[in-house]
Image (cartoon, rainbow, N blue to C red):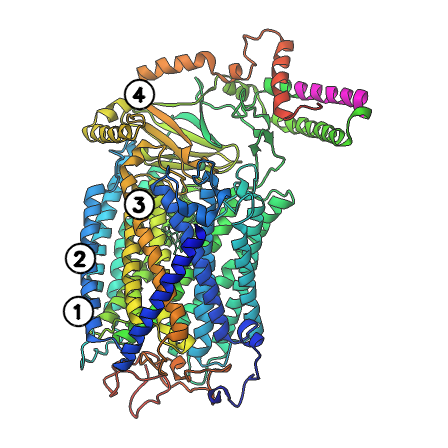
Amino acid sequence: MGAHTHEEGHHHHESFITKYIFSQDHKMISKQFLLTAMFMGIIAVILSVLFRLQIAWPNEQFEAMKFFLGDSYLTSEGLLKPDRYLAIVTIHGTIMVFFVLTGGLSGTFSNLLIPLQVGARDMASGFLNMLSFWLFLLSSIIMTYSLMVESGPASSGWTVYPPLSILEQAIPGSGLGMTLWLLSMTLFIASSLLGALNYIVTIINLRTIGMKMTRLPLTIWAFFVTAILGVLSFPVLVSAVLLLLMDKTFGTSFYLSDIFIGGEALDASGGSPILYQHLFWFLGHPEVYIVLLPALGITSEIVSTNSRKPIFGYRAMIGSILAIGFLSFIVWGHHMFITGMNPFIGGIFVFTTLLIAIPSAVKAFNYITTLWKGNIRYTPAMLFSIGLVSTFITGGLTGIILADATLDIPVHDTYFVVAHFHIVMGLSAIFGMFAGVYHWFPKMYGKMMNKKLGYAHFWLTLIGGYGVFFPMHFVGLAGAPRRYYANTEFAFLDHVQDLNEVITIFAIIGGLAQILFFYNFFYSIYNGRKTTQNPWKSNTLEWTTPVEMGHGNWPGALPVVHRWPYDYSNPEHEEDFVPQTTPLKEGEHSH
Amino acid sequence: MKFIIIIVIVLVIIAAAQLMKVYELSSRLRNKDEADVTPAETKFNAGMLLLFYIALMISSTWLFFHYGARPGLGASASEYGVDIDFLYDVNWLIILIVFYITQSLLFLFAFKYQQKKGRKAVFFAHSTKLELLWTIIPAVVLAGIIIGGLSVWNKITTPKENATVIEIYAQQFGWTVRYAGEDNTLGNSDFKVIHETTNPLGVVTTKLINAKEKAWTREIDSLTVYLDENGDLTPDATVDEIEDKIERLGRQIRRLDPLRKSQTAETNAAATDDVIVKELHLVKGVDYEFKFRSRDVIHSALFPHFRAQMNCVPGMTTRFSFKPIITTAEMRAMPDVAKQYKEISENRVAEGREPVEFDYLLLCNKICGSSHYNMQIKIVVETQEEFDVWYAKQSESKTFEMLAGLGTTVANEESIDTNVAAIDTVNVITEPVAQ
Ligand code: HEM
Ligand SMILES: [Cu+2]
Ligand SMILES: [Cu+2]
C-alpha cells in the first residue's frame, strides 16, 4: 500500500463502497463506464445477430430467438413479429451509438486519460464525474428494461422520427416502450453533459507545469473537441426529446399536423415532423464525430507509439480535428435531402458535407505516412488501429456518394447507408475502442492482456466486419430498403438474397469472435501477467505513474513537462522514446 | 434446454481458462514479456496483413464486377436517371482509384515496416509540402465532384413546365393515386374530411362540406335525443362517452368553416374530375409532376427503377418530377432483365412460390410500422393509346364525386345527405353508441 500515499490531494482511507461503488476516482469511474458499455454491447451484438438471422432466412424458426427474446417477440408459428423486428433494430442502434460508442468510448477513455495525460490528480469535479456515471448506469438499466415491457420497446428506429414515435396507434412500441426510451435518453444526455463539462474544465485548467496546449497528446485534443461538440449539440437533443415527450403525453403538437389514424382525425395541427428532424440531426451529425474523434485520437497515440515514430503532421492533425468539429455543425441537412427541403439549401449542405472530406483525408494520409519507415510493433492495439485506418478510408469514400444529393436519391435509407455508417461507426470507432482497451489495459488493471487471444480476436473481427459490411453496399445498391422485416415481397431483391445470407454468416463469426475478447478481458484482470511501469515504452505522462496507483495518481509531486509527446526515434537521443518529462538537452529545441 | 446450454458454456469457459493458465505459466517460465512482440508473432501478423490485403483487393474487385453499381435494376427507366447513373459511374471510378491506392499504401507500409531488431525508425515529423499536397488534391477532386453533382441536382429538382400532375398518397400500409383530370389541377384536400372507403384522400368540395355538416349535425341531434330519452337508464360511462362524441362532432363542424371559406368555383371544379385509383399508370415520354402526401406517419416513395425518391410527410405536400422513357413491355423484353426474371422465377417455383414477371414498383422506404416491408404498388409504363383505354375505364367509376357518393347520378339533395350520413356514422362513431 506504500505507493498509495502522497502528500497532497484528497487522499483518504476508502471503504469498499467509496472505492468500488460510489467512487469519485476518475480511474474507477472509467472502469465502471467500460464495464457498463461492455454489458450493453453484448446485448446490442446479440440483437444484431438475431435480426440478421431474420433477414437472411425470413421463414425459418430459430431456437436462438426464443432463447434470447422469449415468446412475446414471436408469432404463434415461432417467427419474429414484424414490429418486434423493428424494435430490436431500434434498440440495437440506440445502444450501439449512445451507450457503447458515446457513453462507453468517451466515458472510459476521457475519464481514464484526461487526468493522467495532462498531469492532474483527478477530474475538476470528482462528484459530478461520479454523478455522470450513475446517470449513465440508470439510463442503461431503463433502456435494457424497456426490452421487456409488454407492448415492446421503442420501435421507430434509433432516430425515433415522429409521428411514428408518438402515435401508439401506428406501432405498439410507441407506447410505454417509447416513453422509457425518452426517459432513458434524457438521463443519458444529462450524464453526457456532466461528463463533457468536466472534461473541458479539466483540460483547460488542470494541465501540469509545461503542458502547453501544443504539447497535448492527440488523444486529449480529440477528447477536448468531442466534449465541446457534446456540450453544444446535446442540449438541442434534449429539447427535441422533451418536445416529443410533450406531444406524446400532454397533447401538444410540435411535430404533429393533419393526421388521420385509426379511423379518426386527430386534433393536432400546425406542427411539423420535419422540425424534429432538423433538431435531431443538429445533434445527430456532430454525434457521429463524438463517436469517431475519440477513436481517431486513440489511434493517433497508438500508431505513433507502435511505429516508434512521431505522429506525422501533429499540427495538421490538431487543425483537422478542429475543422471536423466545426464543420460537423453545418452539415446536418445531408440526412434530409429527400424530405422535400428546398433544393438550393440541399445544394449548400452538399458543399459543406464534402468539405469535411478534406480534413478527413489529411488525417488518413497522415496515419499512412506515420507508418512509412517506422519500426512497427504489431501489438493487438496497433493492429486494431491499422484496421481503423483501413475502415475509416473505406467508409469515408462511400460517404462521398451519400453526401452528394443527386447520388443520395436512389440509395437514401437503403442498406447502402447501413453499410456506410457501420464501416465508419461499427468498425472504425469500435476498432478504436478495442485498440484503447488493449493499449491501456495495463494502466487500468496493472495486468497485461493475452496477446495471442488478442490476435485471434483482431483477425476474426476484421474479417467478420469487412465480410458483413462490404457486401452490404451492394444490397443497398440493388434497392433494398433498411428496416425491412423481410425482402421476400419484392422479386427484384431476390437478386441479392444470397449476399444477405453471406452477410449473416460473417455476422455470426464476428459476433462469436467477441467472446475471445470478453474472455481475455476478464481472465486477464485476475490472472494476467503483471505489467511493468511503461510496457509500451511510451512518452506520455500516464506511464510515469506507478503501476499501483492510488487516488491522486502520482505519489509525489506532479510531473513537469518539457517536450511534446511524440519524440520517438529522435536521432538526438539514444533510446527510441523520450518521455515528456525528460528535460531538453542543451541545444535541443522542443517541437 | 436453456439450463443445458448454460452448463455447456460454463464448462467450455473453465476448460479455456485452464488452457490459458498453462500457456501463461509456460511463457512465464520462458520469461517472456507480454508487451514484447516476438519475431514469430511479427511474422504471423505481417503475413496476415499481406493476406488480408490481397483478399480485400480481390473480393472488392469481384463484387464490383459481379454486381455492378445497380445490381438487378437494369437501365434507368427515367430520363434524368440516365444522368444519375452516369454520375455514379464517374464517382465510382474516382472512389475505386482512391480506395486501391490508399489501402495499398496502408497495408503495404504496415507490412513492409514490420519490427526488426536493431532498426530505428526514421524521425520524420512533418512536411508542409506533403501536407499541402494532400489537402489540395482532395480539394480539387471534391470540387469536381460537387460541381458535377450539383449541376444534375439542379436539373432534376427544377419543376418542368406543363408536366402532368399526379398525386401519390401514402398511408399505413398502402398507396393511393389521384389523377388530376382534364384540367391537370388537383382539387383541395383536407384530412378532416377523410373517409376510409368513400373519400380516402380527403378531397374537399363545397358540396362535400355541406353534406358532412348536415350529416354531423344530424348525428348530434340523434345523440342528444337518445340521451334525453334514455339518459337515466344508461350507465354513466356511456353517457360520458356520448357527450364526448357530441362535443367532438361539434368541434369537427366548427373546423369545417375555414375549409368552406377557401373553396371557390375553380377548386370545386378541379376536384370534381379527379380520378382516384390503386395503380399507377404512366405514359412513356411524358413529364410527370408527382405530389406526395401522407395520412398518418412519414413514408417515402422509392421508385428504384426510375432512380427517384421522395418522402411523404403528414401535414405537407412534397414534389418530384421525372419522365419515364422505357415501357414495362420494353423492359421485360430486354435480354438481361428477361434472363434475370427467368432465374428468379425458376428459383421461386423451386421453393413452391409463384413465378414472377418484371414490373416497376413503388415501395415505401421510410420506417412506418409493422408492414413497412410490404407497402408497395405496381407501376405500369405504357404507350399513350394503352393509357387512354385504361384511363377512360377508370373515369367511368372512380372519379371523386362517384366515390364520395356525391355524383350527379344521385338526383336529389336528400339522398346525397343520407348517403354521406350513413357513411359518416361509421367514420365518426367507431363503436355502437349503446348496446
Ligand atoms: C455484429 C455487428 C453488427 C451487425 C451485424 C449489425 C447489423 C446491423 C444491421 C443489418 C442494421 C440495419 C437494420 C435495418 O436498418 O434494417 C443495423 C442497424 C444499426 N446498427 Fe448495427 N450492426 C452491428 C454492429 C453495430 C455497431 C458496432 C454499431 C455502432 C455504431 C451499430 C449501429 C447501428 C445503428 C445506429 C443502426 C441503425 C438502427 C436503426 O435503423 O434505427 N451496429 N445494424
Ligand atoms: Cu451526418
Ligand atoms: Cu414504410
Which is more N-terminal, label 3 or label 1?
Answer: 1
Q: Residue at x 60, y 44 (%)?
A: A248
Q: Residue at x 29, y 88 (%)?
A: A588
Mark 3 against mark 4, which lies toward the viewer? 4
Magenta extent: B214-231
What is the number of the mark on residue B112?
A: 1
Q: Which residue is mark 3?
A: B149
Q: Are marks 3 and 2 on the same chain?
A: yes
Q: Chain of mark 3?
A: B
Residue A431 shows in this picture: no
Magenta-span inclusion, residue B12 = no
Q: Amino acid at mark 3?
A: Gly
Q: Which residue is mark 2?
A: B54
SS label for mark 2 = helix
Which is more N-terminal, label 4 or label 1?
Answer: 1
Q: Are marks 3 and 4 on the same chain?
A: yes
Q: Residues within 10 Å of mark 1 (few under 14, many from 20)?
A: some
Q: Nearer the viewer, residue B214 or A7?
A: A7
